[in-house]
Image: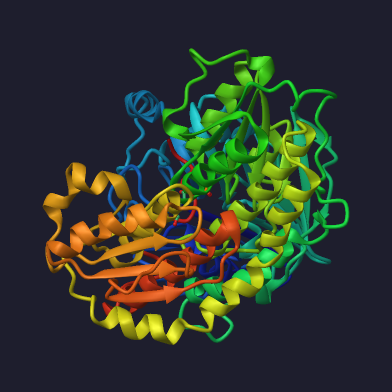
Amino acid sequence: MCGIVGYVGDDTAGQIVHGGLENLDYRGYDSAGMALLGDDGLTITKREGEVSNLSVPTVTGATCGIGHTRWSTHGPPTDTNAHPHTGMSDDIAVVHNGIIENYEELRATLVADGHEFTSETDTEVVPHLLERELDDGRDLRAALESAVAKLEGSYAIATVCADTDRIVATRHESPLVVGHDDDAAFLASDVTAFVEHTRDVTYLEDGDIVTLADGDATVYRDGEVVDRPIDTVEWDATAAEKGGYDHYMLKEIHEQPTALRQALSGRIDLDRGTADLDLTFPAGFLDSLDEIQFVACGTSFYAAEYAAQLIESFADVRATAELASEYTVDGGGDPRRTLTVAVTQSGETADTLGALRRANGGGIRTLAVTNTLGSTVTRDADDSLFIRAGPEIGVAATKTFASQVTTLALLSVFVAQERNALSAADARDVLTDLRGLPGAVQQVLDDAGDVREAATAFVDASAYFFVGRAHGYPVALEGALKLKEIAYDHAEGFAAGELKHGPLALVTEDTPILAVLTEGTRPEETLNNVAEAQTRGAPAIGIVDGSVETNSLDTAFSVPSLGPVTPLVANVYFQLFAYAIAKQQGRSIDKPRNLAKSVTVE
Ligand code: AGP
């Protein structure tokens, strides 16, 4: 949620900050604003709505500026609640991501001291606190250090002040990254903001204070300068552009074959029948495990559910997937014989990080499975495994789901082999199926026109029900989530057998049933459940692979059989279906209402 941008350099800060905000508006698009420091002091401009509503003011000599795009938590999306926020005067401007939990108490103290507030946000306490610190004679860096010591909650904060030609920023449980160019320094909550200018980045750590001045960045810790490594981002700006597609989501759906190749690259040895992951666990640790717990949210949770099934079937170990926001370590087994795997595309989801910290606190070894180098999850977990999907801009996750399941399938084989639970021959079968994924997904993508045409008949449906068994069940849940997110229509995913235990009451001729009917998902039984819905008038669409006779379906789409990962290929039809429905309804597909790509509040 929310995006921060900062720039200090020789170029016109207004254009660069605005460009950065445009690159980041998938993080939140309720309102946007910027503060530019020019020859005549600070100019602040902010506007409700998307970044495109915000015009760049003409500010002479502006070579320093900060900007923000917001996903509202405290206070509705209005011009007044938009960031940057100021204190009693307009000489200081602050942008903030996260939530300041003790803001009511701080606000009351400040009001008692005579401070007047204009917005309903939690953020506004920060510039007022800074004013107080500056009045006490501190410079901006010391003032920020002292002000944030009073905050509880999570934050990334950047500030500029009228009489100091610099940006000062800090983070606590909210991402912040610095970009280094020859004569410029950048700041952002996500490298996407400035990757068109530089790929050399420093990921800040919690508690770091960074100063951007004279085109350079200096990181401080407890008042002392510290060295932080400079990493090079592997992808460039074109990876974060639409590339001729109408929406990022459609581009990312079509990028799946490439993303899957990247996820698999160098990780399969078919001769030996092994999954080669760059992971080292203590000797005997995987072998002695009683349980693997996955924690995740949303789409990542469905990937985790898929993975838990794969691990149980390959690795002969209990595996569970828990919603991160519900996860507790109480009542679990021996922490020394448990592995908790946090699955998160962004690596910044607060609920998932919270669960990971609870696991760490309970003495459990942890592993992060993520798309994002340098993200918080990679620091908090004992080990990290990257899904290598490349940047995903569409708020609705598509290619990252495919890359998550694929990477987790590799992990399942890896764990199984460490536990001697899977023979090389059986592993080779699974790995061969995984190798077939990019081509199989491409076949589905080649069918996109047929899905678009078929979807036309269902665009006015009153609800959509997705059903599946075994690996088809998480895919049904994911199919329904995509439709909800981007079409704003009622859609639910059910374990196919559950339909008759209640949901069948919702079924009418206006509620299409979309079913996964592929090998390994008990398609005969699911087909019976589909028939029960058809008897009540529901049209039925099935994703089939020839493993059962499916003439009774109203519409069928075929996928090649790839053993346990066939439902992952079926999911691509669901993605295309959701996209086609949302497109025909003219929805805001890349930036669905009320949502943001990364949810950094609990
Ligand atoms: C997916 O389409 C959603 N936008 C959402 O459910 C997402 O998967 C969830 O918020 C978790 O995000 P993460 O993978 O970055 O942790």
Q: Position of residue 345 (x, y in %)?
A: 58, 51
Apparent side of residue 150 relative to residue 216 in the rendered image (left or right) = left
- Against 152, residue 533 (above or below) is below
Q: Quadrant of residue 458?
A: bottom left
Please determine whether, in this image, residue 483 is positioned above or below residue 71.
below
Residue 151 lies left or right of residue 257; in this view the side is left
Q: Nearer the viewer, residue 94 or 582?
A: 582
Where 86 sits versus 337, above or below?
below
Q: Quadrant of the C terminus?
A: top left
Position of residue 15 measured from the top left corner of the image (x, y, whole percent): 58, 74
Question: Which residue: 67% across, 35% down?
Answer: 315
The answer to whether residue 34 of the structure is visible from this angle is no
Residue in front for this viewpoint, 529 or 116: 529
Q: How many marks?
A: 0
Residue depicted at 51% across the width and 83% down the height: 245
The image shows residue 421 at horizontal and vertical percentages of: 72, 34
Q: Residue at the front extreme?
A: 549
- Is 321 situated above or below 358? below
Residue 462: % across, % down: 16, 65
Q: Is residue 421 left or right of residue 133?
A: right
Kindly indicate the quadrant of the structure image that contains residue 45: bottom left
Residue 89 or residue 21, whichever sits in front: 21
Q: Quadrant of residue 517?
A: bottom left
Q: Is residue 343 visible?
A: yes
Q: Residue at x 43, y 87 (%)?
A: 449
Q: How is the image coloured?
A: rainbow
Q: Residue furthest right?
A: 271
